[in-house]
Image: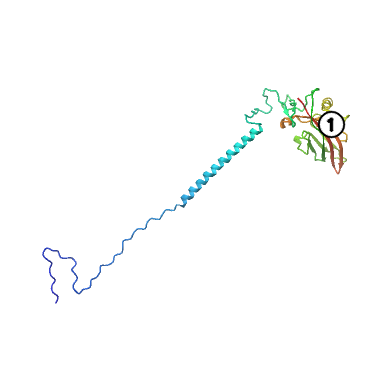
Amino acid sequence: MEPPTPHPPIGQVPSAVPPPRAGTATVPPPHLPAPAVPAPPARRRLWPVLAIAVSTIALLLAAGAGLVSWRALDQANDARDIALRGGPGPAPAPSSEPGASTGQEPQPTAGPAGEVGEPPAVDPTTGEASDEIPINPTAQYTLVYEKQQLKIQARCNYPTYADLDKPEVRVSEAVADLGVFRTCSTGGVAVFQIDTPAASVSDGSLATLSATDCVDRIRTGPIADGAEVPIKQGNLLCLVTSASRAVTEGISRKVVALEVVGVVDEQGTSTATVNVTTWNIPR
């Protein structure tokens, strides 16, 4: 029989849990799980922000490079304009209308060798340069080139043009002083077509013909405008180059003496060999 449980001393509150009895195994308290610790928030991804920043920097660099290139091109154009004007300074102001009068006398134009040519006459009805040449019996014409040989070939429907200012063959009709055509009929012949003042010379030779002689022949016995002149060996012609083209190209007009020294017709093609001498029309 177990002895009675002793009572606690007076004034002491008995414990809620009685002490284990002697000879009884002690039961450990139940194991409770540790409270869950919240995981730290995931870090924000930074690569989209970096990509936007890099793109912005690239755009700014491209814009800067474009600005530098544009400025360099602008400066190069300025330098070219200055060089074409012969040095720094304001460019000449263009006239408000083509052919408008400036109240000043027309200035002479410089030829290829630096000679000064006569300003072309002006047609009073159109205000444009006229192909009529001013006649000055005491003028001293300046030789540009002498007995320059040209070979001009043409066949039916395929004319060939020559620029006698340079001189040069196979140029466009717009800059030509002389055209060579071949008629398409049986036994066709080659002809010159001349659209500027000209004259046919029946006596003399290229060696003895002077610029003053040519001017006199053109004045006293001109060929009709646009006339076709048959090309024959020994033909001698005088003409002047285009006035309007001289103004456009900034060159002096020329008096031209031309002599045919050979003509060959074969297989529908005509080849004219000519010797040409030119003089600048003086002031």
Name of the residue lying farthest toward the bottom: 1
Q: Quadrant of residue 7?
A: bottom left
Is 193 situated above or below 44? above
Residue 177, image x, y percentages: 78, 33
Q: Quadrant of residue 29?
A: bottom left
Residue 49, image x, y percentages: 46, 50
Residue 275, image x, y percentages: 83, 35
Nearer to us in this view, 139 or 269 = 139
Residue 245, image x, y percentages: 74, 31
Visible in this render: residue 230?
no
Q: Label 1: how many residues lie within 10 Å, few (<14), some (14-19) or many (20+)? A: many
Of helix, strand and loop, which one carries label 1?
strand
Visible in this render: residue 73?
yes
Q: What kind of residue is marked 1?
A: Leu
Q: Quadrant of residue 189?
A: top right
Left or right, residue 69 beside residue 190: left
Is 102 situated above or below 34? above
Residue at the image position 56 percent from the left and 40 percent from the top? 68
Q: Quadrant of the N terminus?
A: bottom left
Name of the residue lying farthest toward the left: 10
Q: Quadrant of the C terminus?
A: top right
Nearer to us in this view, 100 or 168 = 168
Residue at the image position 50 percent from the left and 46 percent from the top? 57
Report the residue marked by disc 1. Answer: 237
Left or right, residue 259 beside residue 242: right
Model colouring = rainbow
User: How many labels were placed on the picture?
Assistant: 1
Left or right, residue 33 beside residue 169: left
